[in-house]
Image: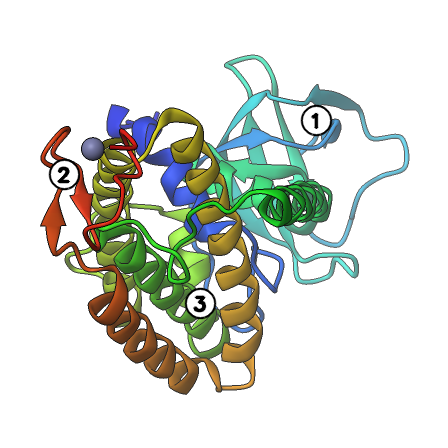
Amino acid sequence: MKKFFTFHYSLLPFLLLIVSCKPSPVGEIEGTERMWDVDYNFVLSGDSLVLQEDRPMHLQIVPDEADSFVVYKNDHLVVAQIEVIPEDSIDSVWVKVARDQLTQGWVHESALMEAVVPDDPISQGIHLFSDSHVIAAVALFMVALVAWLVRRGLKRRFHIVHIDDIASPYPMLLCLCFAAATVLYTSIQIFVPQVWAEFYFNPTLNPFGQPTLLCLFLALAWVIVILTIASLDDIRRSLTATEAVLYTLSLLAFLAVIYIFFSITTQYLLGYFLWMAYAAIAVWQYWRRHRPRYRCAHCGAPLHDRSSCPKCGL
Ligand SMILES: [Zn+2]
């Protein structure tokens, strides 16, 4: 069995945020070699999968009366053997998988790929967020969140990144890095899809020793984790509890907008130029208007100017 590292789990929400959604279905990419082999571990993600008890024979494919049995959702399957039957018109590759010592059977590779995900939390996260229902649910939640924030914003002003930012560079840097990660992620999908497929079947959080684009992407994922923690800490320090929650929600909605905007524009190769323009404007705006020049004498919160403190109101 493949070993997991516990830090996979703790970083999962951040990684999911970054890798959530992919244009092409993850799986076998035409013309490339198989990314998994004997002893690879899968989990059944479909409702059930029918396995044939008898080994498929050359020139005698799937007898109608073949004995078969069913494995169910969340069953763990390990690849025991891979056999090529060139005469098979449906799929020439047969895979023998084992749920346990007694439950072992054969299935076409194509049928297997449709029903399983790799037994790793990162792969399962990618798989989950490639589900169109999940994307629709997240998009719907984001639309509702933006609508609610706009309604509230019309009644009473609240802080938002870039436009009316807090006196901290981290939310601005988080947005820039998130945009860069989106551009990189889309680029990997377009230019080197086999690298993404390889990552899906053999995920890692270690950026070293990876192809350049994937290495940059994973390094950015780590930077995003650090910036998220730094941002949350500065938001807490600079704003009252209610305003901090509102600011964090608006930041989340803004990141969703960034993701949609840059994943679409990068597909038309505009994302690179737009990212450079966005970075220049964001840094300039922060330096001109939002950089902390003063500190509140009462509570120590960083301030843009000498007006009243947003944290304690004095
Ligand atoms: Zn204060």
Which residue occupies the foreground of this view, 249 or 183? 249
Residue 191 visible in the snapshot: yes
Residue 122 in the image: state x and y as whole percent: 41, 39
State the SS at label 3.
Answer: helix
Residue named by callout 2: 296
Residue at the (71%, 49%) spot, across then down: 132
**Mark 1 near ligand 1 (CB under 8 Å)?**
no
Residue at the (16%, 44%) spot, across then down: 302
How many discs appear? 3
Tell which tag, 3 or 2, sits nearer the viewer.
2
Residue 264 in the image: state x and y as whole percent: 58, 73
State the SS at label 2.
Answer: loop
Residue 215 in the image: state x and y as whole percent: 23, 62
Between disc 1 and disc 3, whose residue precedes?
1
Residue at the (42%, 39%) spot, across then down: 248
Label 1 – label 3 distance at C-alpha: 33 Å
Residue 123 in the image: state x and y as whole percent: 46, 42
**Mark 3 near ligand 1 (CB under 8 Å)?**
no
**Mark 2 near ligand 1 (CB under 8 Å)?**
yes
* Mark seen at residue 194: 3
State yes or no: discs 1 and 3 in contact (Cβ < 8 Å). no
Residue named by callout 1: 53
